[in-house]
Image (cartoon, grey):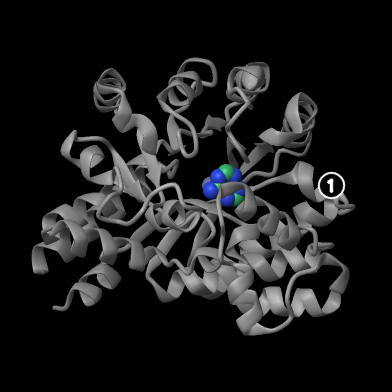
Amino acid sequence: MSLLGFVRALPKVELHVHLVGSASVDTVLALARRHPEAGVPTDRDELSRFYEFRDFDHFLKVYWAVQSMLRDRHDIHTLVVGLAAELARQNVRHAEVTVTPYNHLLDGMAGDELLTGLADGRAQAEAEHGVTFAWCFDIPGEKGIRAGRETLAFALTERPEDLISFGLGGPEAGIGRAQFEPFFTAAREAGLRSVPHAGETTGPATIWSAIRDLGAERVGHGTSCTEDPALLDYLAEQRIALEVCPTSNIRTRQVESIGAHPIRRMLDHGLLVTLNTDDPPMFGATLEGEYLAVADTFGLSPADIGRLAGNAVTASFLPAERKTGLLGEIDAVTAAA
Ligand code: ADE
Ligand code: ZN
C-alpha cells in the first residue's frame, strides 16, 4: 500500500480547524463577488496571492476580511457542508470545529442565523457525508474582556447541544491568557472543555498560563513548548494534548519548514501530539497532507503514523464507545499496512 493509500485508509479526527478558515476557494470567490467592499479577490490567481502571508498579523487581517463576508445562515450552512464533504473525501470521520460567535455578531449576523446555520449544516454533514461535528466557541483575544464576557454569555445562554468546548484565538503577543480566567472558569463549570490557543506566536510562558489559568485540556499549537524542558515534562506527564498544525506555522512564518518544526522534539519527548490543519484552504493544507509531510520528513513507520491518528481520537471529546471503535479501526488498518 502506498503511503497516501495508508494515510487515507486511516480513519481520522481533526481537532483544530476554524470554520471561517475552512471556506473553500470556490466559496470564497463566490462570496467575494457578492461583497466587493470586503476587498477579497474575485479571481482565483489573485486569491492565491492574497493567501500569501507576510507574517501572522497579516494572516489575521486576511482571515478577518473573509470572515466579514459571512452574513446569514446560508453562508454558515455552506461552510459546514463544504467542510464535511472535504473531510469525507479524506476519510476524516469527526471534527471539532472552532466558531467565533462574537465576531459574527459584530459583523451584523443575528445569533439565531449563526446557530441555525450550524445546526442544519451539522445535520446534513452527518446524513450526507457521515462526518460528525462538535463546536468550540472561542474568544477573539484581540477584542479583550468584553469579547470574553459576550462569548461566554452566548455559549451558555444558547448552549447548542453539539457545543463541546471553549477556546481563545487571535494574536497572543500582548494579550495575556490570564485575563480570560473568569470566562474559562465559568465555561468549565458549565461542562465545556478548555482548548485555548497558546504558544503559537509567543513563548512557553503563554502555554503555562493556558494550563494554570485557563485549565487547558488541549493546547492549540503549543509549539513553543520545546523551549522549556520542564514544560515538556509536564505536558508528557499530564497527557495534555497539543493540536499541532505544521503547514499553518510555515505559512504564517512561525517556522521555516517541516524539517525545522518543533514537532520532531515534541514526538521525541512522548507528547500527545495530534495533527491538524487550522485554516486549510488559506494555507493550502489538507489533513492527509499533514500526515504525509510529517511521515515523509521524519521517516515515520506505519505504527508511528497510526499512533498519531490514535492520539487525535484519544484527545478528542468523543464518547468512549466511539473512541473505542475508531481506535480499533486504526489498529486494523495499521496492522494490514
Ligand atoms: N484564527 C484563525 N486561525 C488562527 C490561528 N492560527 N491562531 C489564532 N487564531 C486564529
Ligand atoms: Zn487556530
Camera-side residue of 76 and 330 = 76
Camera-side residue of 7 and 164 = 7
What residue is rendered at 56% in x and 60% in y? 53
Q: Position of 72 compared to 241: left or right?
A: right
Amino acid of disc 1 = Leu
Dot 1 corresponds to which residue? 105
The image position of residue 335, as x and y in percent, is: 9, 62
The image position of residue 21, as x and y in percent, is: 60, 59
Give neighbour class at mark 1: few <14, some 14-19, many 20+ (Cα, 10 Å): some
Camera-side residue of 151 and 168 = 168
What residue is rendered at 41% in x and 25% in y? 204
The image position of residue 225, as x and y in percent, is: 34, 30
What residue is rendered at 53% in x and 30% in y? 194
Q: Position of 305 compared to 59: left or right?
A: left
Camera-side residue of 133 and 281 = 281
Q: Position of 71 compared to 210: left or right?
A: right
Considering the image in quadrants, where does the N terminus appear?
bottom left
Relative to 96, say whether 174 is above or below. Answer: above
What residue is rendered at 46% in x and 52% in y? 253
The image position of residue 262, as x and y in percent, is: 29, 42
